[in-house]
Image (cartoon, coloured by chain):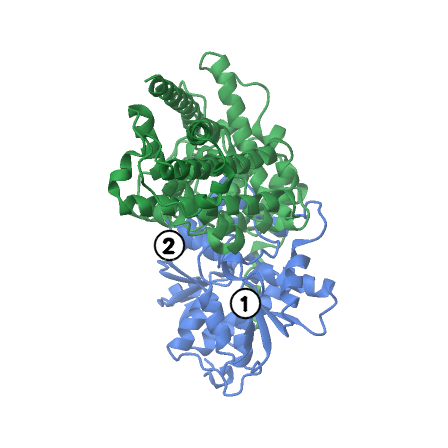
Chain colours: A green, B blue
Amino acid sequence: MISQLLFLLLLSTGIFFFARRIGVIRRNINSGAHWDGSDRTSERWATMARVALGQGKMTTRPVAGFMHILIYAGFVIINIEILEILIDGLFGTHRVFAFLGPVYDFLIASFEWLAAGVILACVVFFVRRNGMAIARLASNDLKGWPSLDANIILVVEVLLMFAFLSMNAADAIAQSRGLEHYVTAGSFPVSSWLMPLYSGLSDAGVVAVERGMWWFHIAGVLAFLVYVPYSKHFHIILAFPNTYYSNLNPSGQMDNMAAVKKEVDLMMDPNADPFAAAPPSDEPPAPFGVKDAPDLTWKQLLEAYTCTECGRCTSECPANHTGKLLSPRKIMMSTRDRIEEIGQQRKANGGKWEPDGKTLLGDWITEEELWACTSCQACVEACPINISPMGIILDMRRSLIMEDSKSPESITSMFNNIENNGAPWAFPAGSRGDWTQEV
Amino acid sequence: MSSFHIPTMAEMTASGQTPDVLFWVGCAGSFDDRAKRITKAIARILHASETSFAVLGQEESCTGDPAKRAGNEFLYQMQAAQNIATLNGYGIKRIITGCPHCFNALKNEYPELGGTYEVLHHTQFIRELIETGKLRMSGDTPFKGRRITFHDPCYLGRSNGEYLAPREVIAKLDAELLEMRRCKQNAMCCGAGGAQMFKEAESGDREVNHARTDQALETQPEVIATGCPFCNTMMTDGVKNAEQESNVVVKDIAELIAEAADLLDAPTP
């Protein structure tokens, strides 16, 4: 009874902290600007099924992709076992699904093989991160916390899987000794290798290992649940809404700013009164482009929280490839850091955010990074969960130009040429058709 | 080759005619000396295939693509509004462009602003001409068995998913098509997009076009084929930088086809 109460306490604590953190992230994401993703629902579901559920873009990098699918399958399928653990924990039963007989044996055996697969993949990932000079994983973007975060996750996953297998090994020994409460159930193809570790123990020792590993595993899972939304690892959940809200238009299509269209329509309208005063409004006019994180759409903020910092975008980026400062991954990481900071300030300030004199553009992301982008969409194509760092970059250029009139001199000349001659170079518009005389 | 007259929309309309397609030349194709050779090749192909076409001439203006991607949405939308007024004024239905940036703007970004047309990249139109028998390759094309690699323009490929048309057209040359390590959706940019063409590159280890040209040269091509005037400039510069200009030429697919097709048979107007 006491252990059931303890379990209930542990479970509700885990869920409470998880839910609280989700609430914070939700508020932060919703502080972004309006974006409408309510259209094309069947196409959206199909994209989510293909890209997130089906891991459709992962295997473009075969090694990382295959290992990732192993962990993904392990994570999703082994969670069926969590259901049994929850029931056992709350109602004081032991292996409540054992009545399923051969089906149960099959399930436990598959969980064990998957657990072995997860351990293998995590070890490979750990070595790739720490022992091999893989550029996107050894990059400066990940110095400090991001790199530690990745390693914590890998180590914890290995520990959890080891606890799961040890629990099964001790259980199997207890079953073979006919100990009380240990019904004969399950098939243990992988954990049988661990049995020699525990078979020398007394009956009480075997039970202690089984119970200890059981508690360690579920406590670890709940701790992981709380940790994940603070981590880059939150992609395991957000990948689904993020791919659902994927950009379904051609990747090179930029949105036409509605506010600008209104102005241009007015200018082109011969009946419009050029001296008419703007209609009175309490709202300050919305800024053009993106200067700070809340100027981004909620979808772009969702992308920032979804990014798992794999760096496929950066390793495909032509600017980064040739040593420029731009790293699309860093754009996403900076965006998340900034919206997190604003969220914390808002909370400290009773729900209202006062500008703190800092902005995403300028204090996190520099003009040099923005001007290195070729808008080639390689980052968009490379992202396994359809994030667009390029969208944020181009939106920030809009702020630079339309709010601050800041551009490299040559870009200013290009603008002037288009305005005066209808071409980005200083050729007279009248000579545009001259080539036709040369055929 | 005999010369021929390229009508403008204004001329056509004045004589009560309506062409089947508008050839949208673009700024590079109109003003840049190298790109003008591509434009002329496209014009020769259109003429030889007896396509009824016209250009806007002085009435054409920048689509606004480089302004938009550099952040100047106002300038872009002013350009768009002006061009849409011109295009709609002439009742244009079908447009061929020689530039993937114009292609992307006209095809994807103009409709919402009131300009909806069927827009084709020139490689798509050339494929159509070959498929419908309006354009014939000479029996012995000068590119037979030659090693050609194709550099995918970002705004044709990744942007609009068109990887096949340029390759199918190259296939008609009887050449050996070599794919780069990075091709199709994984192709690397030439470095000109997003208004980079009009500014100095930010500081780094090297130029994007030099890196991309190296990838092209790895395939040991005789010809680097392009489908974009800006890519053409960048790759040409890359080949010079690698001191390979005596071994490798950079040419637009339209130029290759104009050299290989039976254009001399075409009747002169």
1 and 2 marks on the same chain: yes
* Mark 1–mark 2 distance (CA, rounded to whole Å): 24 Å
Quadrant of the frame with the C terminus of chain A:
bottom right
Please tell me how crowded label 2 is: few (under 14), some (14-19), or many (20+) other residues with Cα within 10 Å. Answer: few
Q: Amino acid at mark 2?
A: Gly
The answer for which chain carries disc 1 is: B
The answer for which chain carries disc 2 is: B
Extreme residue in the bottom direction: B139
The secondary structure type at the circle numbered 2 is helix
Quadrant of the frame with the N terminus of chain A:
top left
Q: Position of residue A331 (x, y in %)?
A: 56, 37
Pointer 2 residue: B89
For residue B251, say whether it is visible: yes
The secondary structure type at the circle numbered 1 is helix
Pointer 1 residue: B39
**Mark toward the start of the polypeptide (1 vs 2):** 1
Q: Residue at horizontal 73%, vertical 62%?
A: B241
Extreme residue in the right direction: B243
Extreme residue in the left direction: A99
For marks 1 and 2, give the one nearer the viewer. 1
Extreme residue in the top direction: A350
Residues at discs 1 and 2 in contact (Cβ within 8 Å): no
Looking at the picture, tell me which residue is in the foreground, A139 or B54. Answer: A139
Q: Residue at horizontal 51%, vertical 76%?
A: B4
Q: Residue at horizontal 41%, vertical 74%?
A: B129
Q: Position of residue B228 (x, y in %)?
A: 55, 62
Against B20, is A336 above or below?
A: above
Looking at the picture, tell me which residue is in the foreground, A164 or B236. Answer: A164
